[in-house]
Amino acid sequence: MIDAHTHIGRVKSWSRRLIGTVEAGLRDLLEYVESEKLEKVVLLPVAKSYLDIGEDIVKTDGVLKAYFLHPDKIIPFCAFNPEDEGLREKIREAVGNGCRGFGEHKVETRIDNEHNISLFRICGEHGLPVLIHIDNRFNPDFEGFKKVVSRVEETVFIVHGPGWWAQISSGKTEETYPKGKISEPGEAVRILKEYRNVYADISAFSGLNAISRDRDFGRRFLIEMSSKLIYGTDFPCINPEGLQFGPDRSHISMLESYNLDEDALEKITRGNILKILKPD
Ligand SMILES: [Zn+2]
């Protein structure tokens, strides 16, 4: 299995049972890889720290350092601010150093602004899939993402976050983590079906909640979309119970609980991400 969504650095706990921040370094990440017998992890930097929420995730240079030390275990991505000078050159250099994707893209501008669009195009030219987080603060909003996917068809996107996963069900909602039965599939399902270049990762609480809120729907969704879904946890983030994604096994236990056939499970936990990464 490959955990396609991990970080090192400091993250805020959003759990009411664990107050404060959690810090995980390279050694902690490798301990997690070892204990879960993972084949590899995708290590995601972010371009910027958000100290107001206690978040200080390692940047591209830190991810590359980890990769150079453990090239057999770590698949490095790069992340830069879309408004950076010399962006094209920075991405070229990161690719030269071994980066195989872009993200986690987490900026406070609208997802469909022109700087983002040109960034996504540069990534496409290099064959880098772009991993995007969508919520009310970062890369808002879902309507903007719909514009992005129709304008940038040559780039592969891996999308996640509350702003994406709330749309698994049709209709507007103000809730970050909507619960309950899904009577009609939402726009996220339509996009996964219609756009060959859009994938979704099931990491963090948003992915977990979306696929487990209605178990009948969740199972059908996993089977039908098994070529478009990607296993990831968002290690070292903290789940609502105060446990840590990854070592808490919540995502993998959820997948296992659905008794998928071997082929579907293999694609979600390994095959799909390997297919869309920039080749080694
Ligand atoms: Zn993340």
Image (tube, helix red, strand yellow):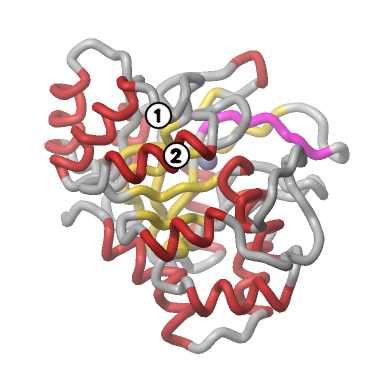
Residue 258, x across and y down, in percent: 65, 80
Q: In this view, does 121 lie to the left or right of 16?
A: left
Image quadrant holding the N terminus, namely bottom left
Residue 20, x across and y down, in percent: 76, 27
Of residues 143 and 258, which is closer to you in this image? 143
User: Are dots 2 and 1 in contact, CB under 8 Å?
Assistant: yes
At a point 47% along the width and 24% down the height, the residue shown is 110
Q: Characterize the local packing of mark 1: few (<14), some (14-19) or many (20 or more) Cα atoms within 10 angstroms.
A: many
Residue 190, x across and y down, in percent: 49, 60
Q: What stretch is highlighted in magenta?
A: 9-15
Find residue 112 and name its label: 1
Task: State whether label 2 is within 8 Å of ligand 1.
Answer: no
Q: Characterize the local packing of mark 2: few (<14), some (14-19) or many (20 or more) Cα atoms within 10 angstroms.
A: many
Quick one: which residue is furthest to the top in this view?
Answer: 85
Q: Label 2, on which residue?
A: 145
Query: Measured along the vertical axis of the image, is residue 170 above or below residue 221?
Result: above
Find residue 100 and name its label: none
Residue 205, x across and y down, in percent: 68, 50
Amino acid type indicated by mark 2: Phe
Residue 195 is inside the magenta segment: no
Residue 116: name its quadrant.
top left
Q: Is mark 1 on a helix, strand or loop?
A: loop
Q: Is residue 100 at all visible to an observer of this figure?
A: no
Amino acid type indicated by mark 1: Asp
At a point 52% along the width and 61% down the height, the residue shown is 189
Q: What element carries label 2?
A: helix
Residue 14 is inside the magenta segment: yes
At a point 35% along the width and 39% down the height, the residue shown is 66
